Image (tube, rainbow, N blue to C red):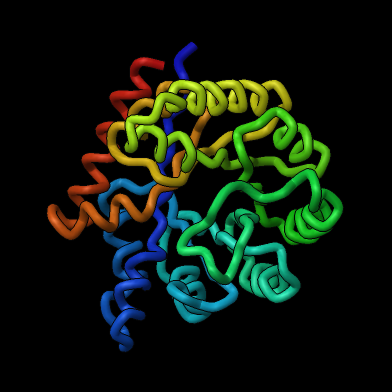
Amino acid sequence: MSAPRLRLGVNVDHIATVRNARGGALPDPVRGALLAIEAGADGITAHLREDRRHIRDEDIARLMASISKPLNFEMATTDEMIAIALKTKPHAACLVPEKRSERTTEGGLDVIGGHDHVKQATAQLKAAGIRVSLFIEPSIAALEAAHSIGAPVVELHTGSWCEAVSEGAGQADHEFERIKTAAAKAAELGIECHAGHGLDYATAQQVAALPQIIELNIGHFLMGESLFMGLPEAIRTMRRAMDKGRAGA
């Protein structure tokens, strides 16, 4: 039996980062989302941070009104963000850790130490018909906690592996084995498995060969590539890399 088609979620946060560096309305992350969908994205991801450093509330509202594909709303497990999600009702909400001082999300959500809090947030969102995913470390303990919480979806944090690959570090194989083992565990537990953070063409192609993973969420790399080749071509190139990797699954 062949592996299911691998979906691509495109994160448009850093279009908003460029916009906010100068102020004003351009470049518009909603336009970027529409271009991404036209080029082959299966969904759009946007992270509304507590400090609104890139995506803003009005961006979320406009994305919900404008795009034809599902919106994956990345959010911290705070009362404010839960209230926004319940009001907005995106297709999906991905619960992530968030620190004011971090440049990007650093590591997975603490689903073990914060088990009860995350479980309560998950239950609220699921009751509203929102598909909940948890952004977690690729570990058996985290997968078991996610299962106990009742999350139907997890997104495995691939950042440590991608960093090791880019640095030529000796632990790259070890980090990939952690992802491989976690993806298999997710399937065993009946949890839909996604992956993301730090992926480029080569790493996306490699992780695409894991048949249990059915969605990749990629943003920063695609936005960087789009400066040189344009966003649609960057997405088409990523899609080809993913399809090539999947063909070997």
Q: Nearer the viewer, residue 111 or 9?
A: 111
Q: Position of residue 7 (x, y in %)?
A: 43, 39
Residue drawn at point x = 67 percent, y = 23 percent: 185
Q: Position of residue 29 (x, y in %)?
A: 35, 70
Residue at far top of view: 1
Viewport quadrant of the C terminus: top left
Q: Nearer the viewer, residue 173 or 111?
A: 173
Quarter of the view holding residue 186: top right
Residue drawn at point x = 45 percent, y = 46 percent: 197
Residue drawn at point x = 65 percent, y = 55 percent: 95
Residue drawn at point x = 28 percent, y = 40 percent: 238
Q: In this rendering, is residue 183 above or below 146?
A: above
Q: Position of residue 17 (x, y in %)?
A: 36, 72
- The reply, left or right, for residue 69 in relation to residue 201 is right
Q: Position of residue 1 (x, y in %)?
A: 49, 11
Q: In this rendering, is residue 209 above or below 135?
A: above
Residue at far right of view: 116
Q: In this rendering, is residue 142 above or below 126?
A: above
- The reply, left or right, for residue 122 in relation to residue 133 is right
Q: In this rendering, is residue 102 above or below 162?
A: below
- The reply, left or right, for residue 137 in relation to residue 4 is right
